Image (cartoon, rainbow, N blue to C red):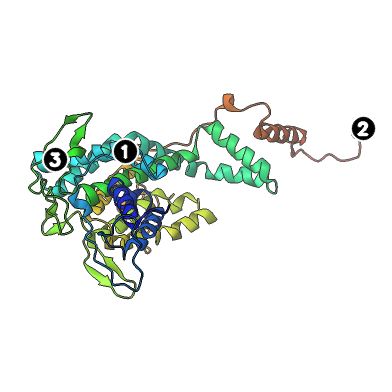
Amino acid sequence: MTPSASSLRTVAATLRVQLRPWIIPIAVGIGVAILLAACAPLAGVSPSAAPGSPVPSLAATPTPILTPNPQSIPLQPAQPGSPPVIGLLAWLFTPVFQSLFILLVFFAEIRGLNMAIAIVIVTLIVRVLLIPLYRKQIVSQKRTQLLAPELKEIQRRFKGDRVKVQAATSEFYKERGVNPASGCLPLILQFILLIPMYSVFSQGLTNIDPNRMLNVFGIQLITLACPGANVPPHPGPVVPCINSNVLGIDLSQPNVLFHLPILGIGISVLAIMSALLQLVQSRMALPPAAQGVDDQNTRIQRQTMLFVPFISIFYGGFLPAGLFIYWIVSTIFSIVQQYLILGWGGMFPVFGWHPAWAMGHTPRFPVAIPAADPTKRTPTSVLSATDDRAAKAASTVRPRERTARKGRRGRRR
C-alpha cells in the first residue's frame, strides 16, 4: 500500500520542525541534498488532498501551499531521533548551543547591553576558558619549528628509506616531548564551537519564542516576554523575540555592503575585516625569515597564507553579521596570545617593509628548544642504532696531527 501525498507531506513537515535548528549547520552538503529531495516532490501537492486520493498530475494547476514559517514555531532543544545521524548530532550539540545562547541572552536582555557588546563579552569568556588549550597548540607549533633543522638532518640521514624516516621522525618527536598532532585539536574545537554559534544567530535570535532553550534540567533560568509567542504558526513574517538590531544592522542576518553580479555573491565589511585579521594571525604563526627555516613547505605556507584568509570574504553574503563579530574578536584574541608567545613571528617583512620596533623583538613568554630525554629512547630505536654506528665510525678515524717532519737518515754520529 503506497502512502498518500498528504501523509508524505505531514512526515516531511514533522522532520523539518524537529531538525529545524540543526540541519543547516551540522550537515551542509548532506542537509541540502536531503532538503531538495524532500521538497521537490511536494511542490505541486495540494494540502487538501484526501487520504488515498491520487497525486495530481504535473499538467494540473498546482494549489499554493502555505508552509508555516519555521521561526514562528517555538524553539526547543533537539532530541535524538530520525534520521539517526543528524538527530544524534543535533542532540549532542544542544548543550553547547544552550550555553552560548543563555550567556548571550543574559548580557543582552538581562543586563541590557548592546547585542554587539554582548557578543564580544561571550566571545572573550569562551576564549579565556580555552587559553590553556590554545597555548599548548602555539607552543607545540613553535617547538616543531625550532626542531626543523634537526629533523631535516634525520631525513637526510635516512634518505631513500621511507619506513626508517617515519620511524626516526616519530622517535625524535617522542624523545623531545613534542606532539605535532596536538595543534589540530584547537582547530577541531573551533569548528565545533562555530556550528552552535552560527545556530545562535540564525535560529535563536530570529525565533518568535526561544524560552524553551533557556530551560536547563527543568529550571527556567531566564524568561523572555515575547509579544508574538501566542500567535499560531503562520506563513507570513514573524517578529523575533530578541532584538538583534545594532545601529541599523540586523546581526542575525547577513550584512551585505554591495553585490558582485559576475560572481553572484555579496561583500560585507565585517567579512573583509575578518579576512585581514586572519592574514595577520596566519603570518605571525610562521617562523621568521631570519631563522633560516625556509624549506619548500615553509615557502608554500607563506604563499598560501596570502590567499586562504580572503576566502572568508565570500562568506559575507550568506552568514549572519553576528557570526563575523564573534570571528573578529576571536581572531584578535588569538593574535594577542600569539604575540605574547611567538612575538611577531613571520609577520614581517611586508612588501619589503620591516619596522625597527619589530626587529629583535623578544616575546613575553618565549619558547625554548626542548631538550632530549634519553629515558624515552628504546634500545631498539632507529636513532640509537645510527648514533652507535656514527660513534664507532668516529672512533676508528685517527686524528691528523701535525708533527715535525723527520728525515730518513739516522742520527749523525
Name the kind of residue labelled 3 in the image. Answer: Phe
Q: Position of residue 185 (x, y in %)?
A: 42, 40
Q: Which residue is mark 2?
A: 413
Name the residue: 37% across, 60% down: 36
Q: Is residue 102 left or right of residue 358?
A: left
Q: Is residue 405 left or right of residue 374?
A: right
* Cα gap from disc 1 to disc 2, whole angstroms: 112 Å
Q: Position of residue 404 (x, y in %)?
A: 77, 39
- Helix, strand, or loop for circle 3? helix
Q: Is residue 276 visible?
A: yes
- Sequence order check: which comes first, mark 1 or mark 2? 1
Q: Which residue is mark 1?
A: 79
Q: Position of residue 408 (x, y in %)?
A: 90, 40
Name the residue: 11% across, 37% down: 223
Neighbour tally class for label 3: few under 14, some 14-19, many 20 plus, Cα within 10 Å? some
Name the residue: 32% across, 43% down: 193
Q: Nearer the viewer, mark 2 or mark 3?
A: 3
- Asked whether 62 or 290 is in front, the reply is 62
- Sequence order check: which comes first, mark 2 or mark 3? 3
Q: Quadrant of residue 166?
A: top right
Q: Which residue is mark 3?
A: 107
Q: Is residue 249 left or right of residue 358?
A: left
- Please determine whether, in this image, residue 266 is positioned above or below residue 398: below
Name the kind of residue labelled 1 in the image. Answer: Gln
